[in-house]
């Protein structure tokens, strides 16, 4: 990737944006649209269809008709696999175009977006495509006069609602296992980041995915997402986003057809540095990278730093020095390390979380206001106590809080003092301590002497109020299958 290639795609007009229902590109039935404002410069770059309940019903009906026709679920596994592998190849071929489009929509620095978005989505689609002909049913160990078979069937129509951070990667975490198991899907991307998702799904049609298998509806969450979650004809709902919306989705499911609901929610992940850490410079780099990538808008961001007393001051000096060197700016400049905050509204929200906060060691302000974009200094706040609201609540921006701890027990108590439990990190050279911490931390992911590892082979899911399901790995497949028992008298 060079700057010239990036600028080529940046200069392209977005063109008419349409939803995808039953294989056709369609506007909202009312013709209503939402303005898409780029956080790079505040410019209006597109008009997004603003769907209503009727559009959602049409998408669900298209999904249902497709599922009932068995055109996808009944296709030979090897043929289904080929379609998904073709799709992954097309995504990779169009990776830079997709990444630039997504960055214009949500402001993620391109260096990260390229890897974490189209390339990662293509990898996830391949991973589940390859699993299609390796998932078997079971024979239960019953007595010899009966045969009990356990069939694994697709659940039917899956609704998927995704957030604005990493829209391609997170969509793929939902869509790929759902499609691999033969389901039809209605996908609802965030109104803040729909453009690249629509383009990626259009490529699925080019790759040979039959019309109606994968539909996309766009628009406001409380209207479009709610209609999907309340639909009587959606069998399972998978969601990544905030806890507040996740709660509503469970209510909607209860008010409608009791569809199964799987939630991947927020985090306030502790990053713990013990004084026996071998390489404090490496730890400092991981702490800074672990919070400030994508302006802190990463679900597993290590946003709560806990440092042992004896090294606290020296370690804070290290991370402050590293943070001040980070280049914040135009996310489509290949040298930028931190791009834009996703929207002007979200930037205001992040800044408001800092109101009245003392002890800001670095940052705390917006940047580059003259560009019209939404930029913020990476911010470190020290001397935080475990009960400060900044320490307890997810900010989802470039803000790191720092607290001290005395010993291992104190570190565990402070780390677990949260209603959330998505990820965590531990730096220590003591192997026994590392294992004790892995056991003691109430989080779905524990990193030891590293931070932010990502691979399709491992599940990602939260403890406590960070969620109730898992994306990625073969475990994610369970969300998209029904088990059916067949008793046969011999
Ligand atoms: P959000 O909850 O505001 O929105 C997520 C999606 O829900 C969007 O598509 C939105 O349109 C839709 N929505 C909004 N209101 C709705 C309603 N009433 N009914 C149905 N749908 C509705 O979240 P966001 O601001 O887009 O994303 C940030 C959040 O996502 C953070 O909390 C972050 O931690 C979380 N997240 C979690 C993970 C994970 O893997 N656990 C990954 C990425 C992001």
Image: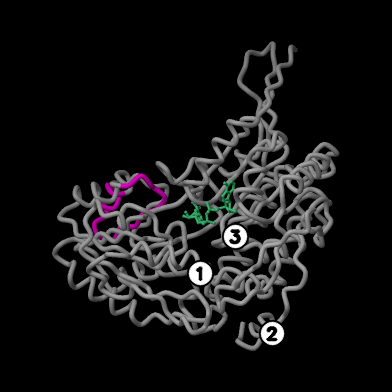
The residue that mark 1 highlights is: 344
Q: Is residue 403 left or right of residue 74?
A: left
Is there any visible trace of residue 88 in the rendered image?
no
Q: Position of residue 298 (x, y in %)?
A: 47, 61
The segment highlighted magenta reads 418-437
The numbered mark at residue 169 is 3
Q: Secondary structure at mark 2?
A: helix
Label whose residue precedes the other's in the sequence (1 or 2): 2
CA separation, marks 1 and 2?
Answer: 26 Å
Q: Residue at x 70, y 33 (%)?
A: 232
Q: Nearer the viewer, mark 3 or mark 1?
A: 1
CA separation, marks 3 and 1?
Answer: 23 Å
Q: Nearer the viewer, mark 1 or mark 2?
A: 1
In the image, residue 181 above or below residue 358: above
Q: Quadrant of the C terminus?
A: top right
In the image, residue 371 above or below residue 166: below
Cβ–Cβ below 8 Å for labels 1 and 2?
no
Bin the neighbour count of mark 1 within 10 Å (Cα to Cα): few under 14, some 14-19, many 20 and up.
some
Q: Position of residue 179 (x, y in %)?
A: 71, 47
Q: Position of residue 242 (x, y in %)?
A: 49, 50
Q: Nearer the viewer, mark 3 or mark 2?
A: 2
Q: Secondary structure at mark 3?
A: helix
């Amino acid at each position: 990737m060079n700057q010239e290639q990036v600028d080529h795609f940046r200069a392209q007009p977005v063109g008419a944006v349409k939803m995808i229902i039953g294989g056709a590109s369609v506007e909202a039935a009312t013709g209503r649209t939402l303005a898409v404002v780029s956080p790079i410069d505040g410019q209006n770059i597109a008009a997004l269809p603003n769907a209503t309940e009727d559009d959602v019903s049409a998408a669900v009906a298209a999904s249902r008709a497709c599922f009932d026709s068995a055109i996808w679920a009944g296709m030979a596994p090897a043929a289904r696999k080929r379609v998904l592998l073709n799709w992954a190849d097309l995504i990779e071929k169009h990776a830079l175009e997709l990444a630039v489009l997504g960055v214009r929509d949500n402001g993620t620095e391109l260096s990260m977006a390229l890897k974490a978005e189209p390339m990662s989505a293509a990898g996830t689609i391949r991973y589940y495509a390859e699993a299609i002909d390796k998932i078997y049913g079971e024979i239960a160990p019953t007595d010899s006069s009966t045969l009990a078979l356990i069939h694994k069937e697709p659940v039917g129509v899956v609704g998927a609602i995704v957030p604005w951070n990493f829209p391609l990667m997170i969509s793929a975490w939902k869509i790929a296992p759902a499609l691999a198991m033969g389901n039809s899907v209605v996908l609802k991307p965030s109104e803040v980041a729909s453009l690249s998702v629509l383009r990626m799904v259009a490529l699925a049609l080019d790759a040979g995915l039959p019309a109606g298998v994968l539909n996309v509806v766009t628009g406001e969450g409380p209207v479009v997402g709610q209609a999907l979650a309340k639909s009587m004809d959606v069998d399972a709902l998978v969601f990544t986003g905030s806890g507040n919306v996740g709660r509503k989705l469970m209510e909607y499911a209860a008010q409608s057809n009791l569809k199964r609901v799987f939630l991947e929610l927020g985090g306030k992940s502790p990053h713990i540095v013990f004084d026996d850490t071998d390489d404090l410079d490496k730890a400092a780099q991981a702490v800074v990278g672990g919070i400030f990538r994508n302006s802190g808008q990463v679900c597993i961001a290590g946003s709560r730093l806990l440092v042992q007393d004896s090294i606290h001051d020296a370690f804070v000096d290290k991370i402050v020095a590293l943070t001040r060197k980070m280049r914040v700016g135009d996310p489509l400049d290949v040298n930028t390390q931190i791009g834009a905050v996703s929207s002007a509204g979200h930037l205001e929200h992040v800044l408001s979380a800092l109101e009245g906060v003392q002890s800001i060691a670095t940052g705390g302000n917006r940047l580059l206001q003259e560009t019209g974009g939404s930029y913020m200094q990476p911010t470190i706040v020290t001397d935080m106590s475990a009960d400060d609201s900044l320490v307890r609540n997810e900010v989802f921006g470039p803000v790191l809080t720092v607290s001290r701890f005395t010993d291992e027990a104190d570190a565990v108590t402070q780390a677990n003092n949260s209603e959330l439990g998505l990820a965590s990190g531990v730096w220590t050279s003591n192997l026994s301590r590392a294992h004790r911490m892995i056991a003691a931390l109430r989080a779905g992911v524990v990193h030891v002497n590293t931070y932010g590892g990502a691979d399709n082979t491992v599940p990602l899911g939260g403890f406590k109020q960070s969620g109730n399901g898992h994306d990625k790995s073969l475990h994610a497949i369970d969300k998209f299958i029904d088990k059916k028992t067949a008793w046969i008298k011999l």
